[in-house]
């Protein structure tokens, strides 16, 4: 053969190949799984027929009638003719008919694995861990290029940016996906994040398939860190959703689940604490002021004992109420804050400002009315362990007491106690 | 690993504020002690609030694949 004279054009060779395929193979019946099904605006339909090891391109012209709505993942039987598409230099089947062919293999595999792992107890709710209220770091395993990553990062950034996101770019589609997801979970475990999100955006059953594989389910099951599975849309369920500690309907919902409180909510709670501190301190100063006034007008000791008794009772009451956990307190404060309208918040803020300036005033006043003023007149105060003896409290022999005078205190032990007539004022 | 000090203590800070609120509610402390924890509580709440409202998301990227395997269309 002479390369100069016997060479042929690309078109000539392609036509030769086409003749070989069409004459040599021609009409075929093929079963396989439908994927990448698209109906073009022209009305023609393009799709791929595949099984676990091979795939073949197919076209079905608008003129061919179709008796059902094809969906990716369906197992189908096609009739057609093998041909060549010269412009792309590829072979394809020109389909004359397309019909469903039983339940797809993937669906059957999904149901089988679901049944197996359910029997092993991997889906049990009592082994699911709760998510942290304030995670310091959140691990994310998803595609670097999908919308899921963007959705999660922007949601976390908007709700609670005081956190570190550790992102592990991960293959979440295709043959290598499940092994990479398993490795990503291990990598994030080593980073000691507080919670891990694995996920991706929506897609066909085969797009999401890696989340239905047993090695991924096992990695989720064995993770030492709580895992959120956020695969696809509301209606997509995968095996990893069932095994995970928490199933989020979408990647955005997962980001919300790891940030249960927003910074604005916590800031409101902090503001609520400050308001309550100011109220408490104001009440204390006012109470002290009352006591000082009573000292000065002579009713002091009798009333102090009364007040002490009341206070003990109040403390007992408070102790019963206290004890509920931090979460309950936060929720309560959030609820209270939410129930206030803007107007009443403003009103409260004004009233707190007024009380705050009163505190300042009272503190100054207190310094000029010292509670120990009677000592200047030579009276002494007897106390035991810091508790002042009032008029109605009897001394008991053997008690160690402190006697306080203006310029000195003395420790003493009560020797004997003699009853006397009440001295009238 | 890098744990941020401020975020580590948000839970602890809230717990401390709750303790202060309870102490002040009980009124068992002397006025000096009350003023002292009042001051502590106000400062802690201010610092926490300032930190939270000015925090910016930190993102750390681990090695791995940078793109999904391309899927034929």
Image (cartoon, coloured by chain):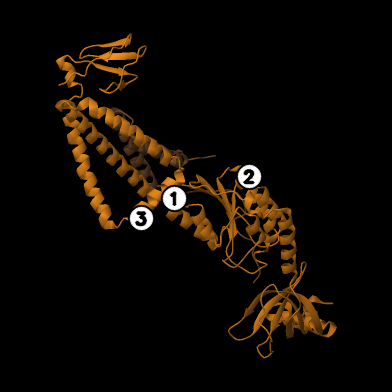
Chain colours: A orange, B brown
Q: Mark 1 points at which residue?
A: A161
Toward the viewer: B14 or A54? B14
Q: Mark 3 points at which residue?
A: A338
Q: Mark 3 lies on which chain?
A: A
Name of the residue lying farthest toward the bottom:
A63
- Which residue: 25% across, 57% down? A343
Residue B17 higher or lower than A171, as above or below: above
User: Left or right of A347: which side holds A19?
Assistant: right
Q: Picture coordinates of residue A202 (x, y %)? A: 59, 66
Q: Mark 2 lies on which chain?
A: A
Residue A420 is drawn in which quadrant?
Answer: top left
User: Left or right of A266: which side holds A197?
Assistant: right
Q: Picture coordinates of residue A275 (x, y %)? A: 30, 44
- Which residue: 58% across, 43% down? A191
Q: Mark 1 lies on which chain?
A: A
Q: Tell which tag, 2 or 1, sits nearer the viewer.
A: 2
Residue A91 is drawn in which quadrant?
Answer: bottom right
Q: Mark 2 points at which residue?
A: A224
Toward the viewer: A144 or A336? A336
């Amino acid at each position: 053969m002479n390369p100069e004279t016997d060479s042929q054009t690309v078109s000539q060779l392609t036509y030769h190949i086409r003749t070989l395929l069409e004459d040599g193979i021609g009409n075929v019946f093929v079963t396989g799984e439908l994927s990448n099904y698209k109906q073009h605006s022209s009305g023609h339909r393009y799709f791929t027929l595949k099984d676990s090891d091979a795939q073949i391109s197919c076209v079905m012209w608008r003129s061919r009638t179709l008796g059902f709505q094809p969906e990716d993942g369906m197992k189908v039987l096609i009739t057609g003719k093998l041909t060549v598409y010269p412009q792309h230099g590829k072979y394809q089947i020109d389909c004359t008919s397309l019909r469903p062919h039983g339940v797809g293999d993937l669906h059957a595999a999904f149901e089988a694995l679901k049944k197996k792992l359910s029997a092993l107890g991997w889906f049990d709710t009592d082994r699911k861990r709760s998510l942290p209220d304030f995670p310091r770091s959140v691990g994310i395993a998803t595609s670097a290029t999908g919308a899921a990553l963007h959705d999660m990062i922007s949601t976390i950034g908007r709700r609670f940016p005081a956190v570190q996101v550790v992102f592990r770019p991960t293959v979440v589609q295709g043959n290598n996906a499940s092994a990479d997801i398993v490795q990503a979970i291990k990598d994030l475990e080593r980073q000691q994040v507080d919670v891990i999100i694995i996920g991706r955006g929506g897609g066909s059953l085969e797009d999401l398939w890696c989340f239905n594989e047993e090695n991924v389910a096992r990695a989720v099951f064995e993770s030492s860190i709580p895992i959120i599975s956020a695969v696809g849309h509301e209606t997509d369920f995968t095996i990893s959703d069932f095994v995970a500690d928490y199933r989020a309907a979408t990647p955005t919902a997962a980001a919300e689940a790891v940030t249960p409180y927003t910074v604005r909510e916590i800031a409101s709670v902090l503001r609520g604490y400050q308001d309550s501190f100011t109220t408490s301190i104001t009440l204390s100063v006012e109470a002290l002021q009352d006591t000082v006034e009573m000292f000065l007008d002579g009713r002091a000791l009798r009333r102090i004992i009364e007040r002490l008794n009341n206070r003990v009772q109040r403390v007992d009451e408070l102790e019963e109420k206290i004890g509920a956990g931090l979460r309950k307190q936060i929720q309560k404060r959030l609820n209270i804050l939410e129930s206030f309208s803007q107007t009443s918040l403003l009103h409260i803020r004004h009233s707190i400002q007024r009380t705050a300036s009163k505190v300042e005033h009272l503190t100054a006043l207190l310094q000029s009315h010292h509670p120990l003023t009677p000592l200047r007149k030579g009276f002494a105060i007897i106390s035991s362990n810091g508790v002042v003896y009032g008029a109605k409290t009897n001394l008991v022999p053997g008690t160690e007491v402190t006697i306080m005078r203006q310029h000195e205190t003395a420790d003493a032990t009560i020797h004997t106690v003699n009853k006397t007539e009440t001295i009238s004022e | 690993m890098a744990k941020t000090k401020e975020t580590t203590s948000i839970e602890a800070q809230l717990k401390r504020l709750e303790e202060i609120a309870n102490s002040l509610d009980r009124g068992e402390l002397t006025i000096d002690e009350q003023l002292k924890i009042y001051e502590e509580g106000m400062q802690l709440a201010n610092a926490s609030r300032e930190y939270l409202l000015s925090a910016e998301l930190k993102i750390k990227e681990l090695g791995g694949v940078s793109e999904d395997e391309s899927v034929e269309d």
